[in-house]
Amino acid sequence: MNMTASSAHDPSAGFSGCGPLLSSVEDAAKPTRLRILEAVRATGHASRAEVAKSLQISPGTVTSVTAELISAGLLEEFERPYLNSGRGRPPVALRLVSDSHHVVGMKLSDVSHSAVVCDFAGEVRAEASIPRGQSSDGTAQSLLEEAVALFDLVTEAAGLRRSDISALGLGLPGLVDYTTGHVQWSPILTEGPVPLGPDLAARLGLPVTLDNDANLVTLAELWFGAGRAKSDFAVVTIEHGVGMGLVLGNSLFRGAMGLGMELGHTKVQLDGALCRCGQRGCLEAYVADYALVREASTAMQGPLINAAEGVVLGSLYDQAKAGNEAARSIFRRAGRFLALGLANVAHLFDPNLIILSGERMRYDLLYTEEVLAEMRMMSRNTRGRPPVVEVHAWGDKVWARGAAALALTDLTETVVRMEASA
């Protein structure tokens, strides 16, 4: 099995913070300790006066609470000499004690698995990836073994032990119950429902939070990317399937049961093409990798059509770019269905921004100007202002960073509760 791992921490590098920069409706109900920790993490560092102003709480409260957090080893003071006018002592700011906790974020998928280690401030310390085992039989047990192997690989790359990790965030495609950690159905599993989260937590001896992988890349945008300063946006992912994540009011929206935003399994054609979920007419049955490979037999000749999925897709794209009209028609058809799906997202949620993300974003024929123009035409409303569409061709590590953000969210809340009860 080919495995790659590397340390990504540079102590001399600047860190501008991570996490949402805008407040949400839920923030007002959070404990003050939690709000302060999240505010300092979001900016990377801040003075007490800056924290009081941004959270609209009294300076006295900030002074008292930060003293408790410093005593607990979660915050520390440091001097910001670059803001010094040259007179007197440099201004003092607060920052999270990055080494107080570490988390692992992990994404499992059809082809390969990826992971990162982040410190308490959200900075990446190491990353690793492994291919999905050729001997994997699709059972929960085999997936569990691969997840444990990747966990050990990435923690070793960070120079840490299992006991040094405070929490794990994990994502995979399919219907994932965020509240229980159970996988109801996944294309990378032959069985279900499966208590993958609880089983992995028992195996590793630490808290595990499970979520749909599209929610992870949405969290990555909210914590590290274009969504940090936006209150409402959607992320549509196109890889082996089609997924979606949604941020409303600066918070990730999952639905009543935590199973929402399954854009890929919305129906765009009655009695249409067979989807891998077993139903017909789903959007991803016309847009995802396996849909393009299925259609490739009409455009390609010879033994290549029996090659690996990635090889077929690459060749199909190359032929389309070279002018093969049959190959171009496959991407054109998929693009039209994608335009329909994006228009539906615009009508249902009215986001300011739709981000197209995933490995398949390198296939620009899926989102040509003609495709986006058709989306705008279908989503035209009384305002006449459809959402902006941006393309982010992230690699697998950004999904893992979203999983780390998931782990940090739960861990920070847990740490605050523990300090409050101490």
Image: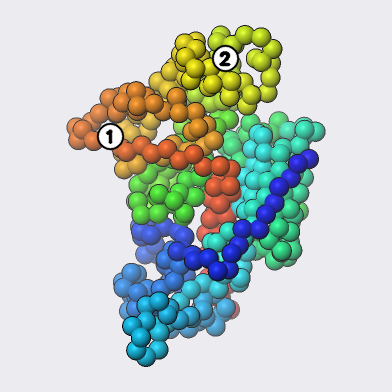
Q: Considering only order in the chain, which callout, 2 or 1, is on the residue closer to the N terminus?
A: 2
Q: Which mark is residue 296?
A: 2
44 lies above or below 126: below
Circle on res. 301: none
208 w.r.t. 272: above or below: below
In three-dimensional space, the C-alpha distance between marks 1 and 2, rounded to whole angstroms, equals: 32 Å
| Cβ–Cβ under 8 Å for marks 1 and 2 | no
Q: Position of residue 264 (x, y in %)?
A: 49, 29
Report the quarter where the N terminus lies. Answer: top right
Q: Residue at x 36, y 54 (%)?
A: 229
Foreground of the two, 36 or 85: 85
Q: Element type at marker 1?
A: loop
Q: Residue at x 19, y 35 (%)?
A: 383
In this view, 39 is above or below 402: below
Tell me if I can see residue 230 in this picture: yes
The residue carrying pointer 1 sits among few (fewer than 14), some (14 to 19) or many (20 or more) residues within 10 Å by Cα, namely many
Q: Position of residue 127 (x, y in %)?
A: 64, 53
User: At x 40% / y 76%, what residue is drawn?
Assistant: 82
Q: Position of residue 342 (x, y in %)?
A: 38, 30
Residue at the image position 48 percent from the left and 20 percent from the top: 321
Give neighbour class at mark 2: few <14, some 14-19, many 20+ (Cα, 10 Å): many
The part of the image, by quadrant, that contains residue 25 is bottom left
Q: 342 or 323: nearer the eye?
A: 323
Amino acid type shown at disc 2: Ala
Q: Which residue is mark 1?
A: 386
